[in-house]
Image (tube, rainbow, N blue to C red):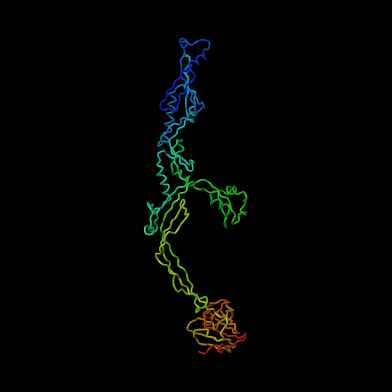
Amino acid sequence: MAILTNKKSGRFNILKHIVPLPLLLLGLLFFPTKSFTESDAQGFIIDSVYHLYSDDEHIGVFFDKNEVEQFFNELLEKNEQVYSTIDLTFDNNLRWVEERVFRSISDPPPENDINKSIVEDHFQIVTEAKAVQIKNKVIGYIPIDTDTDKIVDELIEEFIDVDDNMMEEEIENLEEVLSVGESFIQDITIEPSIDFKKTTVSPKKVTSFREIEKEIFIGGEVLDTYEVQAGDVLGKIAKKYNMTIEELLEINPTIHSEEQLQIGTELTIETNEPLIEVIITRFLKEEEAMEYNTIVEKDSSLWKGETYTKQEGNQGRKEVVYKMITTNNKIEEKEVIQETIVKEKTDKIVVEGTKEVPSRGTGNFTWPTNGGVITTYQGMRWGSFHKGIDIARPNDYSILAADNGTVTFVGWINGYGNTIAINHNNGYRTQYAHLASMNVQVGDVVSQGSKIGVMGSTGISTGIHLDFEVYYNGNLLNPMDVLPSR
């Protein structure tokens, strides 16, 4: 038979006392043939039996309530050692039902029939915490005593520069207030907002906001597109987005090999998108260089291709006040608000010649050297005919074009050494031999008196000099007949 009880178990208010069957009913069950009297109770002991439940699941029977209470205390103390900085409590999921039964005096006292490891599995320790939520989705849990205003401020500070100042009120003349490199923050917004909700949770799930912050900015995976560029290969693209080649091919089923990658092909890629955006509007002042322009002036008195710098260019400097909007430190907008020139720029002026070099000779020759003496005239010399004249000991070693014309030969001729030939496009042709160096190329159009080379002693030569020859319609002339007298 059973007796009703309703006792509280002190610290373990999670153990709820449930009313069992009446003792009288149990007695009738055991002794159905006669009425129960006090004499019948002699030789029997009434024991309490405690049935432990987790919600509706029966997880054991015990007879010594003190032993179970001690067991629960040990579990709590064990968890308090692990989570020493957190206040713990019980999740109210355990209950017990007390039942009183008869036992013969000759029978031994009953023993507990309970598996403590099973009880421990059902024993839920919880703590008060704050759930961190974005768009009603729980991102994690932080200690209940966390200053949420402070951690949000600290999160924002990661996006603020040391030169940033907060604008307490609207500033009319930012140009005068701001120094170069300084900025004023007008507004800071977090979208969507971070919400904090008080709750109870297993202490295992409680962490610092710094850990949760990493997840917030790593964000969730989203699909995006990537356009293949020159030099791209599957491995390079996959590495760029922290993917394997296999993962890249899995979400791009039409691509099977490198050969299918063409410039401009669009691939689907996986990338991470932060769960929040820290949007900051700030005003800042920067000093910038003003690049000078290069102005070209034309001069008809200069030969085409000739240039000189009339005025050197110098950079200017300006101070610019910008209104800039950033999202997670990425610049979204940058608008010029004010601009002040600190130093004017100076444009560079270059003069270019436009005078065309005529390719047709005038027919009136000038001397091919600056001064000098004729050491050998045209005629017989050492048993052979000398076709031109030799000029030596000039004022300088420049070799000059005797008339306008087109260069038709630049190179080596046996006996003559380094040689230049000019067609004057009027029947005349001149030749310059024994040169130390040559300053023109075949096809160049040269003007009368322009430098074409340097006097030397190449080929068969007795010293530094110029061998100068003149032809008309292919026929050799005496240079002295066409050169002006000195």
Q: Which quarter of the picture shows residue 483?
A: bottom right
Count of labels in the image:
0
* Residue 52, percent from left and from top: 48, 25
| Left or right of residue 264, residue 282 in this image | left
Q: Between residues 397 and 210, which one lies in front from this camera angle?
A: 210
* Residue 404, percent from left and from top: 55, 82
Above or below, comparing residue 338 to residue 98 in the picture: below
Q: Residue at x 56, y 78 (%)?
A: 445
* Residue 354, percent from left and from top: 52, 77
Above or below, comparing residue 485 to residue 181 in the picture: below
Q: Between residues 474 and 86, which one lies in front from this camera angle?
A: 86
Q: Residue at x 48, y 40 (%)?
A: 138
Above or below, comparing residue 314 to residue 357 in the picture: above
* Residue 58, percent from left and from top: 51, 26
Q: Between residues 161 and 63, which one lies in front from this camera angle?
A: 161
Above or below, comparing residue 457 to residue 260 in the picture: below
